Image: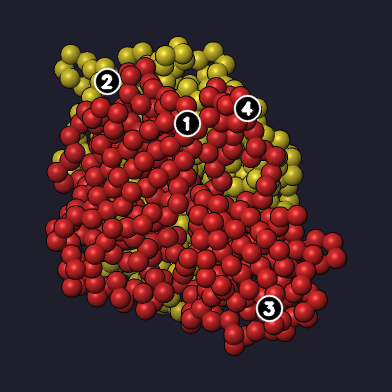
Chain colours: A yellow, B red
């Protein structure tokens, strides 16, 4: 079984459809005269006068690709090896908690805040707790998936220090490891009712030469509800790798490949995306036209931008690093569309040139 | 591969050893004259005058009030089939959320209460949210693992109504299934600082002629912290039956003698005592205490190595110190190992 099939198997019942119950008005939030949530109203405050971070938040996609030069060699080697394995071992793909992984700061969260603790609830049904009862960060807590976190207020910014992570989680989807000595610092600032920024820094001298991090903007998701996104099939069902596909030795005649060369346009993640398929040295190459798109070519590595050959596994189905590509052919074997198969399902791109 | 090995494969790095950081005293809780948490002090209240359920709670596995006579024949058939399969399909054993399963009301929970919502955080990192902002229970929410819950106060009792469960969860570890029409009603009553009683009723006319349920009695765990308990291996690896006799090894009687003793610990939130004795060259474990198993039945421990023993489906691992004398006994459950230190 190829990754292509595995990806299809992973399309499990977590498809979120538009539904009436998702459009209920959230009670007790500030609104503009036309009744819409007023996202620029002042941030709410708790009884202690501190900003209240509570709410359902939709965070932008996180781009957190550390400089390869900042990684200890074992971390870089492991990252490259994991790329070849399509990042199959990523905790998220194994139905395990993502812990401090940068990319998982994106997406939906619900925050609850009491004077003694803040809870962050993720849509994958994992949760973490930040103690705000004045306790110190423990020097040596038992390593676990979500870490041990304490928070304190620095003016209107909640500063969270975390330690006690096990070394099974990644700090980036690009397979970047960390040690149990990892410390994470987060600075949460809710600047108004509808907007919050989080600045995250990873410090781990055993893995990184210098601390590094990223910033993520979150927008309050008012008048809706967070849906569960539970992993039900682990990547153990994935089989094969790019080198396996190569060794299968499927040969497609150059005149067939030539029928696939062209420009394909479609929608991915709500945005228009254009694939250019070219032929070089008898191999098909996929690139994304325009600015570099994070994760656009599947298992993009730390050294993104390299051309990605498509390895044939049949006359119409190809494997690219981490993604399946299927050409839909019309008359005379000329492609009319390209279907790119992600973990989340297939995406169709119509041929425009 | 037998169940025994599968259980060993489940020993993952979650050993909850006694550690100093787990014993920090909490600030701002009522204490008795000797400094211990006063669990019978009055329950705290929030600014709105309602009881505040916030805290770290645990309770024993509840006894369900279930009569098979009230279940549809297909439900009873499924219960029997699941029993034959060692309940391998239980969501917990598949690293999936347990949803409304009665047995999962046991164990540790953290409750956070805010005016708009209450969150219940489980030790397996899953959680549920009870909306308190006055909204109505949705008639037709998208089915999910944890359901859609709204709560309201009736005097000092929090009444929670839930719907929108998917059909993948069980109502107890014995394999009672339910339909997507399941409704769950919970009545939470924090009767004093240290005690929370929860009355749970399952209503699902398509599966059960009459509603049924259970009562959970939870106690506050003060001056400590909740540990994660993460499922990392699914029951897909289980094979065969829980029999260790066919692979038994011989362990010298003088080695076995070093394991004899009384081990104390906590399982499922309640105290458990394991008394290990040696009789005719055979180690026997007797489990007593509030979390006793099978009324304190004797379990022969069949050696699988010098330190690992099969005890009728549960693996026991002796942790040895100097001179090979046991200092603790790990009882290895699907949910992970539980450590029982030996009493001096």
Asked if residue B201 lies left or right of residue A105, the reply is left
Q: Which mark is residue A211?
A: none
First in sequence: mark 4 vs mark 3: 4
Q: Which mark is residue B35?
A: 4
Contact (CB < 8 A) between labels 4 and 3? no
Residue B64 position by quadrant? bottom left
The residue that mark 2 highlights is A29
Which of the two marks, 3 or 2, is nearer to us in this view? 3
Subunit bearing disc 4: B
- The x, y position of residue A1, in whole percent, is 43, 75
> Do the residues at pointers 4 and 2 share their chain?
no
Question: Badge 2: how crowded within 10 Å, few (<14), some, or many (20+)?
Answer: some
Looking at this view, name the residue that lies furthest to the right.
B323
First in sequence: mark 1 vs mark 3: 1
Q: Secondary structure at mark 4?
A: loop
First in sequence: mark 1 vs mark 4: 4
Q: Nearer the viewer, residue A13 or A284?
A: A13
Question: Badge 3: how crowded within 10 Å, few (<14), some, or many (20+)?
Answer: few
Which of the two marks, 4 or 3, is nearer to us in this view? 3
Subunit bearing disc 1: B
Which residue is painted at 67% across and 34% down in the image?
Answer: A138
Which residue is painted at 33% across and 49% down in the image?
Answer: B215
Which residue is painted at 25% across and 20% down in the image?
Answer: A28
- The x, y position of residue B208, in whole percent, is 17, 61
> Do the residues at pointers 1 and 3 share their chain?
yes
Q: Which quadrant holds the C terminus of chain A?
A: bottom left
Asked if residue B41 lies left or right of residue A206, the reply is left
The residue that mark 3 highlights is B279
**Residue B189 drawn above or below residue A159:** below
Residue B256 position by quadrant? bottom right
């Amino acid at each position: 079984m190829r990754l292509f099939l595995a990806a299809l198997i992973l399309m499990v019942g977590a498809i979120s459809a538009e539904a009436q119950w998702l459009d209920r008005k959230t009670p007790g939030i500030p609104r503009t005269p036309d009744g819409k949530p007023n996202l620029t109203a002042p941030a709410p405050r708790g009884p202690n006068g501190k900003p209240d971070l509570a709410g359902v938040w939709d965070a932008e996609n996180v781009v957190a690709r550390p400089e390869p030069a900042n990684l200890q060699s074992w971390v870089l080697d492991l990252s490259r090896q994991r790329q070849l394995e399509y990042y199959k071992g990523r905790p998220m793909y194994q139905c395990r908690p993502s812990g401090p992984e940068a990319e998982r700061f994106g997406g939906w969260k619900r925050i609850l805040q009491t004077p003694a603790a803040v809870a962050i609830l993720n849509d994958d049904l994992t949760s973490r707790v930040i103690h705000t009862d004045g306790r110190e960060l423990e020097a040596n807590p038992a390593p676990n998936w979500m870490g041990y976190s304490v928070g304190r207020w620095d003016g209107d910014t909640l500063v969270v220090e975390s330690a006690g992570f096990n070394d099974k989680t990644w700090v980036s989807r690009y397979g970047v490891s960390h040690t149990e000595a990892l410390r994470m610092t987060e600075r949460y600032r809710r600047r108004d009712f509808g907007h919050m920024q989080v600045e995250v820094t990873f410090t781990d001298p055993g893995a990184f030469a210098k601390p590094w991090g990223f910033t993520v903007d979150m927008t309050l998701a008012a008048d809706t509800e967070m849906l569960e996104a539970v992993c039900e099939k682990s990547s153990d069902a994935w089989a094969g790798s790019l080198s396996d596909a190569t060794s299968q030795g499927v040969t497609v005649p150059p005149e067939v490949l030539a029928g696939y060369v062209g420009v394909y346009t479609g929608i991915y993640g709500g945005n228009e995306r254009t694939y250019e398929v070219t032929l070089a040295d008898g191999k098909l190459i996929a690139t994304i036209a325009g600015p570099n798109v994070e994760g656009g070519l599947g298992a993009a590595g730390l050294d993104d931008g390299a051309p990605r050959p498509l390895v044939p596994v049949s006359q119409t189905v190809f494997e690219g690093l981490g993604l399946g590509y299927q050409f839909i052919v019309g008359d005379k074997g000329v492609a009319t569309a390209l279907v790119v198969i992600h973990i989340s399902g297939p995406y169709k791109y119509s041929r425009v040139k | 591969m037998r169940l025994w090995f599968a259980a060993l494969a489940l020993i993952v790095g979650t050993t909850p050893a006694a550690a100093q950081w787990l014993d920090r005293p909490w600030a701002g809780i009522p204490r008795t004259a000797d400094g211990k948490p006063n669990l019978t002090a009055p329950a705290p209240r929030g600014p709105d005058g309602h009881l505040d359920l916030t805290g770290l709670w645990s309770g024993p596995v509840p006894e369900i009030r279930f009569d098979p006579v009230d279940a549809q024949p297909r439900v009873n058939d499924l219960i029997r089939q699941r029993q034959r399969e060692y309940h391998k399909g239980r969501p917990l054993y598949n690293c999936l959320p347990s949803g409304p399963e009665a047995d999962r009301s046991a164990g540790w929970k953290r409750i956070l209460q805010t005016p708009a919502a209450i969150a219940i955080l489980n030790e397996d990192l899953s959680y549920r949210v009870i909306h308190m902002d006055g909204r109505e229970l949705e008639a037709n929410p998208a089915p999910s693992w944890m359901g859609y819950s709204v709560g309201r106060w009736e005097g000092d009792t929090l009444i929670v109504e839930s719907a929108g469960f998917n059909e993948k969860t069980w109502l107890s570890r014995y394999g009672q299934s339910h339909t997507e029409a399941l409704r769950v009603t919970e009545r939470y009553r924090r009767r004093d600082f240290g005690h929370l009683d929860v009355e749970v009723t399952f209503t699902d006319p398509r599966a059960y002629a009459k509603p049924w349920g259970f009562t959970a009695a939870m106690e506050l765990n003060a001056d400590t912290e909740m540990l994660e308990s993460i499922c990392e291996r699914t029951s897909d690896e289980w094979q065969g039956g829980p029999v260790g006799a066919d692979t038994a090894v011989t362990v010298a009687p003088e080695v076995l003698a070093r394991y004899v003793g009384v081990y104390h610990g906590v399982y499922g939130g309640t105290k458990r005592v394991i008394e290990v004795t040696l009789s005719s060259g055979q180690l026997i474990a007797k489990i007593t205490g509030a979390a006793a198993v099978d009324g304190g039945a004797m379990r022969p421990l069949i050696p699988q190595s010098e330190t690992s023993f099969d005890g009728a489906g549960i693996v026991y691992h002796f942790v040895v110190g100097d001179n090979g004398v046991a200092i603790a006994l790990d009882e290895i459950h699907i949910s992970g190992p539980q450590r029982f230190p030996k009493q001096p």
